Image: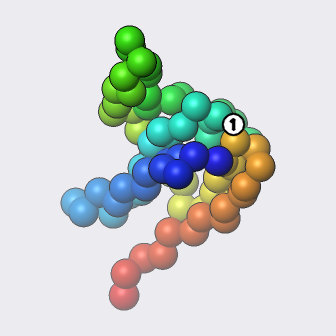
Amino acid sequence: VSREHVRLRRDAESGAFFIKDLSRLGTSVDGQQIPSSVEYVDGEKRDKNVEVKLPAAARIGLAEVVFLNFRASVPS
């Protein structure tokens, strides 16, 4: 698992959550691989800014080694 493997973002306007894979080893959401947001060009890491919208509840896999149970809550 990378030091910064994924990035989660909450859209303030819609309240939706998005996930971005920043690793070389991959990330899955509910068992499905998500596209990587990084590419390496001439040894340099570049962010392609690829995000995937997360469902309200999801199982996030980091390199298929660590699994996180994600659940969005509605502010009261």
Place of residue 28 in the rendered image (x, y in percent of width and height, measured from the top left): 65, 41
Place of residue 14 in the rendered image (x, y in percent of width and height, measured from the top left): 29, 58
Q: Residue furthest front?
A: 43
According to the picture, the residue beneath numbered tag 1 turns out to be: 32
> Which quadrant of the view contains residue 15?
bottom left
Q: Is residue 8 or residue 58 the one in the foreground? A: 8
Q: Residue furthest right?
A: 65
| Element type at mark 1 | strand
Place of residue 31 in the rendered image (x, y in percent of width and height, measured from the top left): 74, 42
Residue at figure coordinates x 41%, y 38% from the top left: 51
Residue at figure coordinates x 57%, y 68% from the top left: 71
Q: How many marks?
A: 1
Residue type for callout 1:
Gln
Q: Residue furthest top?
A: 42
> How many other residues sit within 10 Å of disc 1, few (<14), some (14-19) or many (≥20)?
few
- Left or right: where does residue 45 sit relative to residue 21? left
Place of residue 11 in the rendered image (x, y in percent of width and height, measured from the top left): 29, 57
Residue at figure coordinates x 70%, y 42% from the top left: 63
- Quadrant that contains the C terminus: bottom left
- Left or right: where does residue 49 sit relative to residue 19? left
Note whether 66 is above or below 63 in the view shown. Answer: below
Q: Is residue 71 or residue 9 the one in the foreground? A: 9
Work out whether residue 34 can be spotted. no
Q: Residue furthest bottom?
A: 76
